[in-house]
Image (spheres, grey):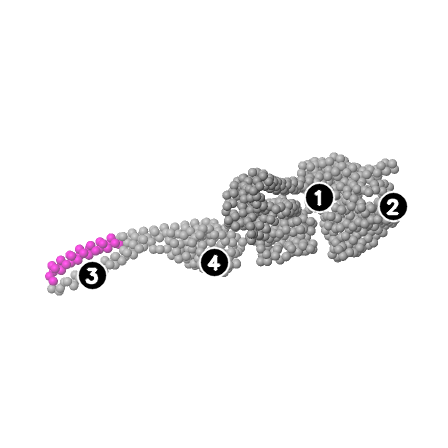
C-alpha cells in the first residue's frame, strides 16, 4: 500500500512567514542601533548621550514587545500545525482502511494519470502483474503490462487494437467496460474523473453474473432450438439447414418425405456432399453443380423447379445464412403446375378460336397493360407478342391513336361499354381503312373493375355499303342491319367464350379441392382401417392360437384348423385391400437398397416348390448372381403374386422362375403352362377383383382377384415396367425389369448357436390393452404357454397392478394406441421407472406408419404387427427371457 506526498498545510506556511518577519525585525534593530552610534561624536555632552540612551531604550522596548508577541503567535501556530498534522494522518489512515475494506478493486490516478493509491483487491485482478505494479506508474504502463503478460483474453487476437480502445475508454471515462481475464474470471471497470483532474477506477468481479447469464442464454438457445424444430416439423415445405461447413444441422420430416431420402443423407453429421451424391446416383446433377454452392459462380438466392425421380415437381430454393451456410427449401408444386398446364391448355384453345376470328381482340388490365392480343391484333401492331404483353397502351400505340381514346378508356374502367369508329389505315395502303371499336369493361365477382376488352372490326366495307345506301336506301339498309347483327353475335360469342373460360377455371379449382379432400379422406381411412379392422382379427387370432395349444378331439381340431384358415383368408384380404389403398395414396413407405437377387428368389422358390408338388406340378428355378437395386419387400410381393397365380391356375405341366440379363436391368420372369389369357383381355386381369375364369383354380381356389392389382401399383411405386405375354391353351409369362445395383462385399460371419432355455412356464407377464377382447385373448394364449399373466386396460391400472404383484414382471406387452392420446411406449417407460428396472417391452400395433416404427425403435422396445402371429410372439419371448 502506498500514497503520494501530501501538500503543505496553512499552519506550516504561517509559521514560516512569522519566522521570516522576526528575522527582518532583528535586522531593522541592528540597523537603527548602528545608525545612532554613528550619529554620536566623541565630544558629545553627557546629556546628549543620556537623551540618546532614553530614545534607544524606548525603541528597544517597543521592538522587544513586538518580538515577544510574534514569538507567542509563532508558538500558537506550531501547536495548530501539530494538531493539523495529527488530524491529517488520522484521516489518511481511516481512508486507507476504508479502501481496503471494500470488496471491489480500487485505483486512484492523479491529473497526470499516475497511480497514487490502490488496494489489495486491485492487485488481485492482475495475478501476473501483482509484483510489478507500483506507485507512480502511468495507466498506459499498466495496460501495456496487461497485454504483455496476456492477462486479458480480449487482447489475444488484436493487442494493439485492444490497447487503443482501453486507453480511449480510460481517458474519456466511457461508462462501464467488461473484460474477460485469462484465468477464467470476468471484471467490470467503472471510472470517474475527480475534481482535481484525476481518475478513480472501480474493478468489480462479475464472474458469477456472467456464468448465470451464460446458463440462461444456453437454456434459451435450447428452447429456441426446440421451438425451431417444432416449427420446421409443422410447415408444409421440406427444409434443410446446412452450416458454414456444409454439415446438416436441422431438417424436418417433409424434407425426407418429399425427396425419398435414404438415412445417410438425413442424420447428424451428414454433409451436403452426401445429398449431392444421392442425387447424382439418380442421374440428377443440377443440385451437385458448383453454382448451387458458390456465390461467385451463381447469384444468391437461387430458385428453380425440378422434376424429381419420384414423379413430383419440386421447387428448390436456396438462401444464404448470415454466418455462412445455406437453407434449402423444397416445395411440392406438382398440383399447381398441373393446374397451370390445364389453364395454359385452355388458354391455347381460346387463342386458337380468337386467332381465327377476323376481329382484332385485346385484353388490358386496369393499369392499361396488355395481357392478351390475338394474331390479327398483333399483325396490326406489327410487333412480336413479347414486345406487346405487359406494356402500357400509351407506349404501344402511336400518340395520334392513343390520345383521343384516353377519356373513353376511363369511362370503360368506370364500368361503361364504349363504342366508336376510328380510321386505321395500314402503312402503304392506297386506300383508308376504318374500324369499329368496342371497349367492354371486365368486372370481377366482387364488383371491382379488373380491366377491359378492346374489340376492333374492320368496317371499311361497311363504310362503302353506307355510301352505297345513299344510292339504294332500302336494299343497302337491310345489309347494314345484317352486318350489325353479325357483330352483335360475334360479341355475344366472345362473351360466351370468356364465361366458358371462367367456368373452366372454377371447375379446375373445385376439382383440385375435391381431389385434395379425397386424398386426405383416403389417408384417414387407411389409418383407421389399419387399427380398427385389425383389432377384432387380432383378438380372434389370439383366441384361436390359445385353443390350438389345448388338447382336442379330431373333430374339434379340424374345426379349429378351419377357423384358423378362414381368419388367414380374411387377414390376406384385408391386407391386400389396405396395401392397394396405401399404394394408391402413396402412403406405403419403401426403401431402395442394393441386394443380391438370390436372397429374394431362394426363399420364394422353397415356399412355392412345396405348393407346386402338392398340386402335382413341376417347379424349376434358375439361380442368378445378379445384384439389383429396389425395395426388397415390394419386389418380393410382386414375384410372390406372380408365382401364386401360376401355381393356382396351372392344371398340369409346371412353373419356371428365372432371370435374364438385359441392358436396362435384370428381367425376372415367371412362366407357366396354364390355360392362358386372351390378348384382348390382358389389361383386365390387373383390375381389382377381376377374374376371367372364377373357380378355375385347383379345388375352386381362384383367389380374390387382387394379386395383380397390387403388382401394378407396387411396380408403379418402384417405377419398374411389368411385362405380360400369353397364349390361350399354352400358358403365360409375367415379368418385371429391375435396375442393377452395386455389388455388396460379403461380410464374414459365423452363425452363433445359443442354448435357449424356455422360461415361459416361469415368466410373470403384464399385458396392457384398452380392448377387453384382446386382453382376454392374450391372457388365454399366454396362460396356455404356462405363463402367469396380469392384465390392465390402461396405464393407470397397470401402475396400480404393480403394487399387487409378488415380484417385478419379466416382460410387458402393450398395445401402441391405448386411448386418450396415451401410447404403449410411454406406459412401459412409466412402469420401468416405478420398479426401477429395465424390464423388456413389446409393443403391438396395427399402425404400419414409419412414425410409429421409429418411435418404438428409438425407445428400445420390440415391435409386433397386428394381427399377431403367436409363433412370432412366443419366439420373441423365449429370446428376451433367456
Tell me if 72 is positioned left or right of 708 in this view: left
Taking the magenta stretch, the answer to whether it contains residue 339 is no
Asked whether residue 497 is in view, the answer is: yes
- What's the distance in space between the residues labelled 3 and 1, CA to CA? 133 Å
Asked whether residue 614 is in view, the answer is: no
Neighbours of disc 1 within 10 Å: few (<14), some (14-19), many (20+): some
Q: Most extreme residue toward the front, as rendered?
A: 471
Neighbours of disc 3 within 10 Å: few (<14), some (14-19), many (20+): few
Taking the magenta stretch, the answer to whether it contains residue 57 is yes
- List the residue tagged with mark 4: 163
Instruction: Look at the numbered disc 2 and give the secondary structure of its residue.
Output: loop
User: Mark 1 against mark 4, which lies toward the viewer?
Assistant: 1
Q: Earlier in the sequence, mark 4 or mark 2?
A: 4
- List the residue tagged with mark 1: 585
Position in image of residue 545 (x %, y %): 80, 39
- What's the distance in space between the residues labelled 4 and 2, CA to CA? 98 Å
Residue depicted at x 24% and y 53%? 69
- What's the distance in space between the residues labelled 2 and 1, CA to CA? 37 Å
Neighbours of disc 2 within 10 Å: few (<14), some (14-19), many (20+): some
**Residue 651, labelled with which disc?**
2
Give the image quarter of residue 537. top right
Give the image quarter of residue 586. top right
Question: What's the magenta region?
Answer: 44-71
Q: Main secondary structure of the magenta part?
A: helix
Amino acid at each position: 500500500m502506498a500514497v503520494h506526498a501530501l501538500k503543505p498545510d496553512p499552519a506550516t506556511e504561517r509559521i514560516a512567514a512569522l519566522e521570516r518577519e522576526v528575522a527582518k525585525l532583528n535586522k531593522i534593530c541592528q540597523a537603527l542601533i548602528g545608525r545612532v552610534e554613528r550619529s554620536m561624536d566623541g565630544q558629545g555632552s553627557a546629556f546628549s548621550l543620556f537623551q540618546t540612551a532614553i530614545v534607544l531604550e524606548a525603541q528597544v522596548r517597543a521592538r522587544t514587545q513586538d518580538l515577544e508577541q510574534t514569538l507567542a503567535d509563532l508558538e500558537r501556530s506550531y501547536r495548530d500545525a501539530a494538531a493539523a498534522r495529527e488530524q491529517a494522518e488520522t484521516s489518511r489512515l481511516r481512508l486507507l482502511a476504508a479502501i481496503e475494506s471494500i470488496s471491489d478493486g480500487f485505483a486512484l490516478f492523479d491529473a497526470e494519470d499516475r497511480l497514487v493509491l490502490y488496494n489489495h483487491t486491485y492487485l488481485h485482478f492482475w495475478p501476473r502483474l501483482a509484483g510489478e505494479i507500483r506507485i507512480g506508474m502511468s495507466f498506459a504502463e499498466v495496460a501495456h503490462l496487461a497485454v504483455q503478460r496476456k492477462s486479458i483474453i480480449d487482447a489475444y487476437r488484436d493487442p494493439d487494437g485492444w490497447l487503443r480502445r482501453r486507453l480511449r475508454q480510460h481517458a474519456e471515462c466511457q461508462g462501464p467496460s467488461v473484460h474477460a481475464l485469462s484465468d477464467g474470471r470476468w471484471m467490470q471497470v467503472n471510472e470517474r474523473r475527480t475534481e482535481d483532474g484525476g481518475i478513480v477506477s472501480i474493478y468489480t468481479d462479475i464472474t458469477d453474473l456472467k456464468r448465470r447469464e451464460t446458463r440462461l442464454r444456453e437454456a434459451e438457445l435450447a428452447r429456441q432450438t426446440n421451438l425451431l424444430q417444432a416449427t420446421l416439423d409443422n410447415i408444409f415445405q421440406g427444409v434443410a439447414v446446412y452450416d458454414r461447413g456444409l454439415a446438416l444441422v436441422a431438417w424436418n420430416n417433409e424434407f425426407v418425405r418429399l425427396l425419398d431420402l435414404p438415412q445417410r443423407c438425413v442424420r447428424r453429421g451428414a454433409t451436403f456432399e452426401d445429398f449431392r451424391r444421392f442425387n447424382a446416383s439418380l442421374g440428377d446433377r443440377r443440385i451437385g453443380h458448383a453454382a448451387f454452392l458458390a456465390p461467385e459462380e451463381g447469384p444468391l438466392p437461387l430458385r428453380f423447379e425440378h422434376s424429381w425421380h419420384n414423379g413430383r415437381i419440386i421447387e428448390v430454393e436456396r438462401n444464404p445464412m448470415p454466418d455462412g451456410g445455406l437453407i434449402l427449401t423444397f416445395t411440392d408444386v406438382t398440383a399447381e403446375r398441373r393446374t397451370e398446364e390445364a389453364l395454359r391448355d385452355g388458354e391455347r384453345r381460346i387463342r386458337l378460336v380468337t386467332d381465327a376470328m377476323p376481329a382484332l381482340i385485346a385484353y388490358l388490365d386496369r393499369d392499361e397493360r396488355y395481357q392478351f392480343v390475338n394474331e390479327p391484333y398483333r399483325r396490326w401492331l406489327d410487333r412480336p407478342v413479347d414486345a406487346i404483353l405487359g406494356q402500357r397502351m400509351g407506349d404501344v400505340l402511336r400518340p395520334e391513336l392513343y390520345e383521343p381514346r384516353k377519356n373513353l378508356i376511363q369511362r370503360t374502367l368506370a364500368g361503361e361499354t364504349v363504342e366508336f369508329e376510328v380510321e386505321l389505315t395500314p402503312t402503304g395502303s392506297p386506300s383508308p381503312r376504318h374500324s369499329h371499336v368496342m371497349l367492354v369493361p371486365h368486372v370481377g365477382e366482387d364488383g371491382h373493375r379488373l380491366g377491359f376488352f378492346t374489340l376492333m372490326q374492320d368496317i371499311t366495307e361497311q363504310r362503302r355499303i353506307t355510301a352505297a345506301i345513299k344510292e339504294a336506301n332500302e336494299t343497302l339498309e337491310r345489309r347494314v342491319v345484317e352486318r350489325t347483327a353479325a357483330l352483335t353475335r360475334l360479341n355475344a360469342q366472345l362473351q360466351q367464350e370468356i364465361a366458358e373460360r371462367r367456368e373452366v377455371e372454377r371447375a379446375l379449382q373445385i376439382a383440385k379441392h375435391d381431389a385434395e379432400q379425397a386424398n386426405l379422406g383416403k389417408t384417414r381411412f387407411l389409418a383407421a382401417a389399419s387399427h380398427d379392422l385389425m383389432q377384432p382379427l387380432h383378438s380372434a387370432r389370439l383366441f384361436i392360437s390359445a385353443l390350438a395349444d389345448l388338447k382336442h378331439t379330431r373333430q374339434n381340431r379340424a374345426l379349429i384348423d378351419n377357423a384358423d384358415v378362414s381368419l388367414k383368408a380374411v387377414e390376406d384380404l384385408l391386407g391386400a385391400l389396405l396395401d392397394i389403398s396405401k399404394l394408391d395414396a402413396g402412403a406405403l413407405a419403401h426403401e431402395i437398397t442394393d441386394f443380391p437377387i438370390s436372397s429374394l428368389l431362394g426363399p420364394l422358390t422353397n415356399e412355392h416348390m412345396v405348393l407346386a408338388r402338392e398340386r402335382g406340378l413341376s417347379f424349376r428355378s434358375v439361380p442368378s448372381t445378379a445384384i439389383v437395386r429396389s425395395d426388397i419387400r415390394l419386389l418380393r410381393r410382386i414375384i410372390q403374386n406372380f408365382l401364386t397365380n401360376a401355381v393356382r391356375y396351372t392344371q398340369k405341366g409346371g412353373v419356371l422362375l428365372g432371370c435374364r440379363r438385359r441392358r436396362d436391368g435384370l428381367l425376372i420372369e415367371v412362366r407357366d403352362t396354364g390355360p392362358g389369357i386372351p390378348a384382348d383381355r390382358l389389361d383386365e386381369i390387373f383390375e381389382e377383383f377381376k377374374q376371367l375364369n372364377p373357380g378355375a383354380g385347383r379345388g375352386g381356389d381362384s383367389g380374390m382377384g387382387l394379386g395383380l392389382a397390387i403388382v401394378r401399383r407396387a411396380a408403379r411405386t418402384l417405377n419398374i415396367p411389368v411385362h405380360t405375354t400369353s397364349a390361350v391353351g399354352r400358358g403365360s409369362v409375367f415379368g418385371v425389369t429391375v435396375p442393377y445395383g452395386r455389388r455388396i462385399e460379403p461380410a464374414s460371419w459365423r452363425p452363433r448357436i445359443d442354448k435357449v432355455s424356455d422360461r415361459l412356464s416361469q415368466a410373470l407377464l403384464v399385458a396392457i390393452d384398452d380392448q377387453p377382447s384382446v386382453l382376454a385373448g392374450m391372457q388365454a394364449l399366454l396362460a396356455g404357454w404356462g405363463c402367469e399373466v396380469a392384465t390392465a386396460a390402461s396405464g393407470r391400472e397397470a401402475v396400480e397392478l404393480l403394487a399387487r404383484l409378488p415380484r417385478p414382471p419379466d416382460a410387458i406387452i402393450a398395445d401402441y394406441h391405448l386411448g386418450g392420446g396415451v401410447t404403449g411406449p410411454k406406459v412401459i417407460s412409466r412402469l420401468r421407472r416405478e420398479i426401477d428396472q429395465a424390464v423388456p417391452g413389446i409393443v403391438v400395433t396395427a399402425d404400419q406408419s414409419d412414425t410409429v416404427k421409429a418411435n418404438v425403435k428409438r425407445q428400445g422396445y420390440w415391435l409386433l404387427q397386428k394381427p399377431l402371429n403367436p409363433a412370432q410372439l412366443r419366439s420373441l419371448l423365449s429370446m428376451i427371457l433367456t
